[in-house]
Image: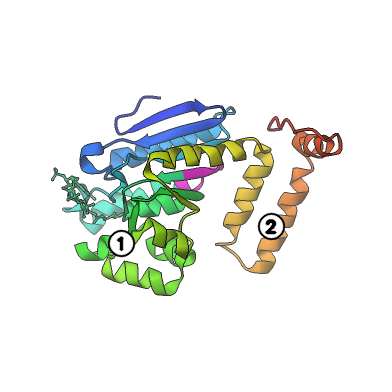
Amino acid sequence: MEFQFIIVEPDFQPHIALVRLYRPKELNALNLQLMLELKQALSALDENESVRCIIITGNEQAFAAGADIKQMESRTPVDLLKIDQFETWDQIRKTKKPIIAAVSGFCLGGGCELAMTCDMIIASESAKFGQPEIKLGIMPGAGGTQRLTRAVGKALAMEMVLTGRFLSAEGAQKAGLVNKVVPDEVYLDEAVKLAGEIALMSPIAVRLAKESVLKTYECSLQEGLHFERKNFYLCFASEDQKEGMKAFVEKRKPDFKGY
Ligand code: DAK
């Protein structure tokens, strides 16, 4: 898979694909082309049967310092409407396979929103999270006010969104924004470890479970429980359910095939 602003390795590790944001000189600022490439790559990886978990990362300096300000500077509302970039972001959100963001350095604005769109975040000690759009005279537009508030609560989200203050990796972990903080040298290894564990599970159960957890954001508890129950029943239509339970009874590790 050849792209200009991302590097994609579908077979980075067994069943684990790696997507690296690659505009190093611009701190991986997310321009339209990069986001389009990311959407195409995730859609292809979602279709790729051998991939069970996806990691998105940047480099040590930056996961992404936000949407490309230079590209946005002269936009009019009509430009934004015509480009309809939200469609691209929505498609990324709809990826069925689990996505882990491996974050180091700056994770700001659209970069932070992209990381929060992922299912889990592993951060290096030097990671810095923020929604600094307010300093540019705008506000977050790709989920920052919604996902950040759900993750860290109103008080901290309000502070970050209204002042643009950064949150350290340690602070992000305390606030529940990230899963784990590890030394800079091993943040990608840690993400791979997490992805590897997920990749050993039944891809069908993983998909249905991810879908069910995300449903929490969209409905009442009753509706969510109902949705969960249907997905639970659906697991029993898979060979993987039979294999998982048989393996338990036979005291061996299951070998999940994804059907
Ligand atoms: N856009 C464009 N270029 C950027 C950039 C960005 N967001 N961030 C950094 N760069 C570029 C710098 O311009 C510089 O390029 P040159 O001047 O060398 O050509 C290079 O990257 C290195 O940056 P610095 O020289 O500034 O590096 P420092 O270490 O001094 O500072 C910094 C690092 C991250 C603190 C600083 O670069 C910074 O404040 N960057 C901007 C952070 C920011 O404000 N981010 C939020 C952007 S607004 C939407 C979806 C999403 C969004 C909007 C719409 N739709 C779906 C419609 C999101 C909006 C945003 O993210």
- Magenta region includes residue 93: yes
In this orientation, which residue lies closer to the viewer: 145 or 175?
A: 175
Kindly tell me whether residue 93 is visible in this rendering: yes
**What residue does disc 1 label?**
166
From what the image shows, is residue 169 above or below residue 202? below
Helix, strand or loop at label 1? It is loop
| Quarter location, residue 217 | bottom right
Q: Residues within 10 Å of mark 2 (few under 14, many from 20)?
A: some
In front here: 92 or 76?
92
Query: Which percent across, then down, holds residue 226?
Result: 72, 61
Region rendered in magenta:
92-100
User: How many discs mark residues in the rendered view?
Assistant: 2
Is 243 located above or below residue 207 in the figure? Answer: above
The single residue placed furthest to the right in the displayed view is: 249
Please name the amino acid that badge 2 sits on: Phe
- Is residue 201 rendered to the left or right of residue 142? right
The quarter of the image holding the C terminus is top right
Residue 227's label in the rendered image is 2
Would residue 225 be counted in the magenta stretch? no
Residue depicted at x 25% and y 37%: 24
Image location of residue 228, percent across then percent down: 70, 56
Q: Amino acid at mark 1?
A: Phe
- Residue shown at 32%/41% (left/top)? 60
Q: Residues within 10 Å of mark 1 (few under 14, many from 20)?
A: many
Kindly identify the residue that appears in the image at 47 percent across and 37 percent down: 189
